[in-house]
Image: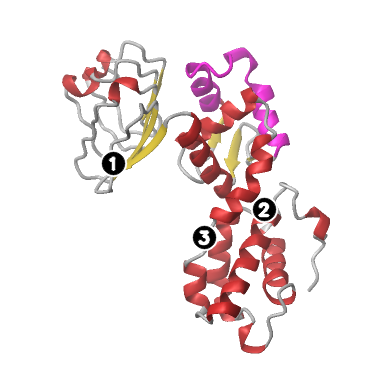
Amino acid sequence: MDIDVRDEDVHEMKPLDSNKSWQLFLKTINHGNKLTGDHKFPMNLEHMGKQMLRKCGGLPLAIKEVGKQLAEKKVSGGSEWEQLLESVDFGSTLKLLEPFYQKLDPQLESCFLYMSLFKESTTLRAGRLREIWHAAGVVSRSNYEPYINGLIDESFIEVGDKGTEYHMNPLLHMLSILKAEEKLGFEILRKNGNNRPSESPRHHRVIICSRDKFNYSTDQDKHLVSLFFHGGGYIDTSSSYWKSFELLKILDLEDFGLKILPESIDKLMELRYLGSRNNYIKELP
């Protein structure tokens, strides 16, 4: 079945729905690369292929790049399709998205970079974006809507079912992380991960942890402006832990499963935003 995606539309950022995404993938990987016979993509792996395509978020440019990459590997290496789907490298696709990022104006770029702090595929509420951008000094509370609309117009975020909720393309989220590491002093630390202390000051941090007891502190804490916890369960409640975050303005603990908010957060004298939604906290200290 043919699809109504023209070659000249491939570099558009407007995402395709799942149906058209799959059709474009098949057209690219089979017909576009002239794969024949046993080399063609097997339809019994459609579910696995669609799972992989979710990372593309419907972007035609990304879908075609992945399709070409897989076809080239199949022709040159003869690997099984299952192995190829599991080993897709989105690095080259992120490079193709660079021009879209480069054309953002400085203030819209700053708004985009702060998207790196959120979980992948999370629902972004307008109020949460407003308060975090405001606390970070990016935009004012009364003038945030033009920047949300700007990200929508550039197809960096999509409007959800509710008019005040938004979603971000998975690949663009990966791009925001890459650029925030370069420009914002951003880092992601993981429980039981190989977390190497950075030589340069880090200003923004995401900590990903499980339900187990987790405490992570470095000598870079004093430089942090924002700190997000992803995962759930436990955070250090000692006064000495929070005292080290001298400049912290943004602390986000949404969906973390906390029952008690530590009283020791009163050490955060510069705090401007505290995200505590969707926890089990009955009262604030």
Residue that protrudes farthest toward the top in the picture? 269
The percent position of residue 121, horizontal first and vertical second, equals 51, 46
Give the class, few, some or many, for how many residues have Cα within 10 Å of label 2's Cα (few <14, many ≥20): many
The percent position of residue 247, horizontal first and vertical second, equals 35, 16
Disc ID at residue 196: 1
Q: Amino acid at mark 2?
A: Leu
**Of residues 172 and 165, the one drawn nearer to the viewer in this rendering:** 172
Image quadrant in which the N terminus is located: bottom right
Residue at the spot of label 3:
89
Disc ID at residue 59: 2
| Residue 196 inside the magenta-drawn segment | no
| Residue 128 inside the magenta-drawn segment | yes
Does the residue at mark 2 contact the one at mark 3 (Cβ under 8 Å)? no
Name the residue located 36 percent from the left edge and 29 percent from the top edge: 200
Q: Amino acid at mark 3?
A: Asp
Please tell me whether residue 9 is drawn above or below residue 71 in the rendered image.
above
Name the residue located 68 percent from the left edge and 81 percent from the top edge: 35
The residues tagged by marks 2 and 3 sit, at their Cα atoms, a distance apart of: 16 Å
Does the residue at mark 3 contact the one at mark 1 (Cβ under 8 Å)? no
The residues tagged by marks 3 and 1 sit, at their Cα atoms, a distance apart of: 23 Å
> Where is residue 220, by image quadrant?
top left
Between discs 2 and 3, the one toward the N terminus: 2
Q: Secondary structure at mark 1?
A: loop
Give the class, few, some or many, for how many residues have Cα within 10 Å of label 3's Cα (few <14, many ≥20): few
Q: Which residues are magenta?
A: 127-154
Image quadrant in which the C terminus is located: top left
